[in-house]
Amino acid sequence: MKNETLIQLENGAVVAFEEYGDASGAPVVFCHGWPSSRTMATLTDEPARKLGIRIISPDRPGISGSTLQPNRKLADWPRVIERVLDHLGIGEFRALAISGGAPYAYATAATMPERVRAIAIVCGAIPMAEREDAEGLLPLYRWMLALYRSRPQLLRRLFCMARPILALRPPVRLRPLLLKMLMLRPCDAESLRDAAAFEAIFESQRRAWRGSAEGVMADAQIYAQPWGFSLEEIHVPVRLWHGTQDRAFSVRLAEGVAKRLPDCKPRFIDNAGHYSLPIRYMREILADLISV
């Protein structure tokens, strides 16, 4: 599969998506991370084909092939998904979110419970606007949140300055140096030494930055804003996967989220981090999701 499809929305904007896995399989909407784009779903392709799962992976507004929509809110996303699924003739579906895709999967479940059979949240972002402190978050996220709240224009300029660098594709010979510079957990660094996994993660990030800094910034702003609903309002089944070595969102934060969800089965995986969990456990995550 893996062919870009463009769908025009009611406001004239365009949403781009690709499909992975089995074209006739059980439909699963993939919610990519941040900064990332639809090709992150490459991680799902092989296990999805073997399990009979159809992965539909859209770019969010302003990311890669989808039109930037200024001042968008998280609540706007379920209508986009509804338009894509109606175009494809899909009724009920499941959703899989990795990292920054979590709020979008939660919003879809909260808004469309009659169509969402279950969602899987992997290394998921938390409702940051509800927290008074930033403990348990990656230092970079803490720094960005502080700037967003105090000097948003400076943060915007920094995004624009970073774009030319982060949109580049580093030579293969420099990958070990890049992994060392990122100061990853050993389990994450080991998983990203696999060439296919490295490409799935970092090519999807480069696509996001190549689109525009504004798109990446607009996506980031969603995390610092109230979601518009509470976790307690989500009554569809949730499978929450989180690594005990996750540096982006500590396992303690994930445990707090799991306790608030009415129908949640958490799976905390030892010796797994923010990258290694979706890379190493994707088959198990998908098999568990479609069993619901």
Image: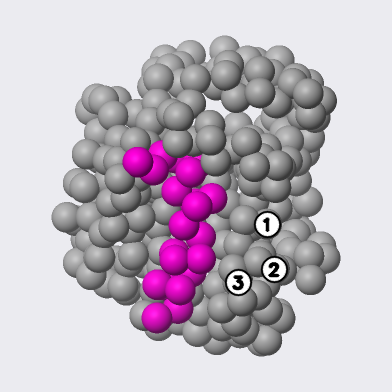
Q: Are marks 1 and 2 in contact (CB under 8 Å)?
A: yes
Q: Read off the magenta span.
A: 271-291
- Mark 3 element type: helix
The crowding category of the residue bearing disc 1, from other C-alpha atoms within 10 Å (few below 14, some 14 to 19, many at least 20), is: many
Contact, mark 3 vs mark 2 (Cβ under 8 Å): yes
Q: Magenta span has 17?
A: no
Q: Secondary structure at mark 1?
A: helix
Q: CA distance from mark 1 to mark 3?
A: 10 Å
Residue at 45% across, 78% down: 290
Q: CA distance from mark 3 to mark 2?
A: 7 Å
Residue 42: assigned label = 1
Q: Amino acid at mark 3?
A: Ala
> Circle 2 sits in a helix, a strand or a loop, which is it?
strand
Q: Is residue 291 positioned above or below 274 on the image?
A: below
Q: CA distance from mark 1 to mark 2?
A: 7 Å
Residue under label 3, please give it: 48
- Contact, mark 1 vs mark 3 (Cβ under 8 Å): no
Q: Residue 67 at x, y = what percent?
A: 74, 50
Q: Is residue 168 left or right of residue 184?
A: right
Q: Residue at x 45, y 36 (%)?
A: 187
> Residue 182 appears in which quarter of the rendering?
top right
Q: Mark 2 = which residue?
A: 20
Comes first in the chain, label 1 or label 3: 1
Q: Is residue 144 visible?
A: no
Q: Main secondary structure of the magenta part?
A: helix
Q: Earlier in the sequence, mark 1 or mark 2?
A: 2
Amino acid found under the numbered disc labelled 1? Thr
Asked if residue 279 lies in the magenta stretch, the reply is yes
